[in-house]
Image: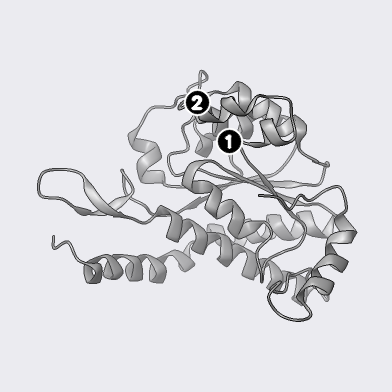
Amino acid sequence: MTISRERFAEQIAHLVQTIPGDPEIPRAADLFTKALTAGGVIQAFGSGHSEAVAMEIAGRAGGLVPTNRLALRDIVRYGDAPASELDRYDLERDPAIARTILDLAPVQPHDLFVIISNSGVNGVVVELAALVKERGHDLIAITSRAHGEAVASRHPSGRKLTDLADVVLDNNAPYGDAVLPLPDGGAVGAVSTITSALLAQLVVTQTVRNLLEAGEVPPVYLSANVPEGDAHNLRLEALYAGRIRRGA
C-alpha cells in the first residue's frame, strides 16, 4: 500500500461514509435524549488521545450544554493527589484511580456516561465502566472492536469496556489504530480520534433532532467567538450550576 496523504484521505473518506449507518448511533442518541429530558447531564471520559473525543461531547460549540468532562487530572485538580501522580506511565492502567475520579465528579442519578477508549481494556476505563453500572447509570462506549478483541484486558476481572456498556459505538479503527502499513512493520495514519469524534457528533446531532421532534428547545452552545455567544452560553450553563465543569 502506498504511503501518501491521498491514500490516507481515501481511508478516512471510506470510514466517514460507512460509520453513519451504524444502527447503534440512534440507540445512543435515545439514551442521550432520555438523560437530558430527565434533567441529567452527559458525563464523558477519555484518557490519552481519547480525551479529545470527550472534548467533542463536553463544552463544544454546536454541542450540548448539559455535558461534563471527566479526566485523569481530576485526581489532582479536584482531589488531593500530588501533581506527580500524573507523571505515572501506568496511570490509566490503575483501576483504583477510577473510583477517585467518579467520587470527585458532580454526578446525579439521571446522568449518562460516555467512556471513550480505543482499546477498551485499560484498568481505569474498565473500572470506571463497572462503577458506573453498579451505580445504575446508562453507559455508552466509543471504542474499536477490532483492537479490543485482539488484546487481553488489563483489568483484574478480565472484563473489557465492551462487556459493560449498554451501547457500543465502533469507531472502526483497525488493530494498532493506523491504516497505512510501513514496509518494515508498523503503520502510519491513525484514525480512531477522527472516527470517534465523528461518532460523537452524529450522536449529538441525532439527539438534537430527537429533542426538536419532541417539541423541546435543545440546550446547544453557540461559539464563544460570535458576539452573542458568551451571554447565550452563560445563561444556559447557569441552569446546570455545580453540575458541569468548564476547565482545562
Q: CA distance from mark 1 to mark 2?
A: 26 Å
Quadrant in the picture for the N terminus? bottom left
Residue 232 x, y percent position in the rendering: 82, 73
Using the rendered view, name the quadrant where residue 56 is placed: bottom right
The amino acid sitting under disc 1 is: Leu
Task: Give the left or right position of residue 229, taking residue 177 as reference.
Answer: right
| Image marks 1 and 2: residues in contact by CB distance under 8 Å | no
Disc 1 crowd rating (10 Å Cα; few below 14, some 14-19, many 20+) is: many
Q: Which callout, 1 or 2, points to the residue nearer the camera?
A: 2
Say which residue appears at 60% left-offset and 55% top-offset.
55
Residue 80 x, y percent position in the rendering: 73, 25
Task: Give the left or right position of residue 95, taking residue 137 as reference.
Answer: left
Q: Secondary structure at mark 1?
A: helix
Q: Secondary structure at mark 2?
A: loop
Q: Which residue is mark 1?
A: 164
Say which residue appears at 83% left-offset and 76% top-offset.
215
Along the line of sight, the residue nearer the viewer: 188 or 118: 188
Q: Residue furthest left?
A: 183
Say which residue appears at 48% left-offset and 68% top-offset.
20
The amino acid sitting under disc 2 is: Arg
| Mark nearer the N terminus (1 vs 2) | 2
Residue 13 x, y percent position in the rendering: 34, 71
Residue 132 x, y percent position in the rendering: 69, 35
Along the line of sight, the residue nearer the viewer: 171 or 215: 171
**Residue 126 visible:** yes
Using the rendered view, name the quadrant where residue 189 is placed: bottom left
Q: Which residue is mark 2?
A: 88
